[in-house]
Amino acid sequence: MPKNSLLVLGLMSGTSADGIEAALVRISGAPPKLKSKLLGHASLPIPKPIRSAILRIAEGTPVPAAEISQLNFRLGHLFAEAAITTCSQLRISLKQIDLIASHGQTVFHQGKPLAFLGAPTSSTMQIGEPSIIPARTGVTTIADFRPADMAAGGQGAPLVPFADYLLYRHEKIGRVSLNLGGIANVTVIPARSKPAGVFAFDTGPANILIDALVSHFTHGRRRFDKNARLAQSGRCLTPLLETLLRDPYFRLRPPKSTGREYFGRKFVEKILRQGRRLRARPEDLIHTATILTALSVVDALNRFVFPRTKISQLIVSGGGARNPLLLCQLEAALSPIDVLTSEKFGVPEQSKEAYAFALLAYETFHHRPSNLPSATGATRPAVLGKISYA
């Protein structure tokens, strides 16, 4: 890499709030000739009491302002510790890191304006006080990426399409990047596309429902369905699946974004109530939630993507990329489109979003916009994030 490159550490905690993903990236140049290389990655679990507090707030449980404030600072320390631990694991000195990108932890996201105190208002909140990170690491930190896009009229999401475009654009092949985190989102990159031709949106739930059901039925002993073992021992409850697929969100046209506030506790309770009426086994509900994720992605592609552009490859990242039942359903429903994982493109499935926010921070550091208005609905490009200096 050129000598004028920067070493950037990206930190990301997603909707599931089960861990902090870290990606160490060497970056140089500027779009469209920006160059980047993943040098290492790590995954650090979020302690159970902290995760419980995050989910309590994110699912709309009334809590005092003091609890949100305290959690914001506690998570700031946790992200700082994640940066320190990652550097130790990768055997690199913190002094060698030029920049830290911290996405923080989303506890609320309302992408489209709703009536609030007499005016249409949209908002987002990612906590994990960024000022703490440079104070503890000595590294300038960029965080709170989403509000600048929303101030420009966008939904503040998805922001990963900037990285998807740089990673996956091809002269001859149309591609869709699918991230299966807590929420499923797609970035559509037509062949020979310019940035303005890229579009993206959240298709609906990914692991959020599966994980919640697994946690419910195992009384918290398991956080996810490893290798889809529980789902594969169940069967699909077709009446329930058909009911869930009629949810209005799936018919909304892009740009659109969603999160735990929509597909969280209340949605899971709806599944559990209907499961009791059907006398369903836990494995059947987990199987059905897995099929719901796959079919809602396929439905979104059929409704909003395939009529607009030819797609030859689907590139999957996120925790759902390790769910064999989910991948099998996508492959069967989307044939002859090739379903690949981001690992084949040099970025492990779990670290793709941390990698993406490292790129966003690099652009912010150079005073360049990195939202894609065609993806978020913003009226203009925006320089994202806020800088906390060391």
Image (cartoon, rainbow, N blue to C red):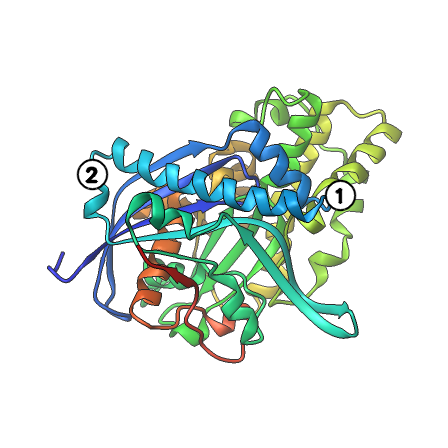
Q: Which residue is mark 2?
A: 92
Q: Nearer the viewer, mark 2 or mark 1?
A: 2
Kind of residue sitting beneath label 2? Ile
* The image quarter in which residue 155 lies: bottom right
Residue 388: % across, % down: 38, 58
Q: Is residue 182 visible?
A: no
The N terminus, quarter of image = bottom left
The C terminus, quarter of image = bottom left
Q: Is residue 262 visible?
A: yes
Looking at the image, residue 278 sits to the left or right of residue 92; the answer is right
- Please tell me which residue lies in front, 182 or 7: 7
At mark 1, the secondary structure is: helix
Q: Which residue is mark 1?
A: 267
Q: Residue at x 78, y 70 (%)?
A: 117
Q: Residue at x 61, y 19 (%)?
A: 221
Q: Residue at x 41, y 33 (%)?
A: 44
- Find the distance from the CA under tag 2 to the CA under tag 1: 43 Å
At mark 2, the secondary structure is: loop
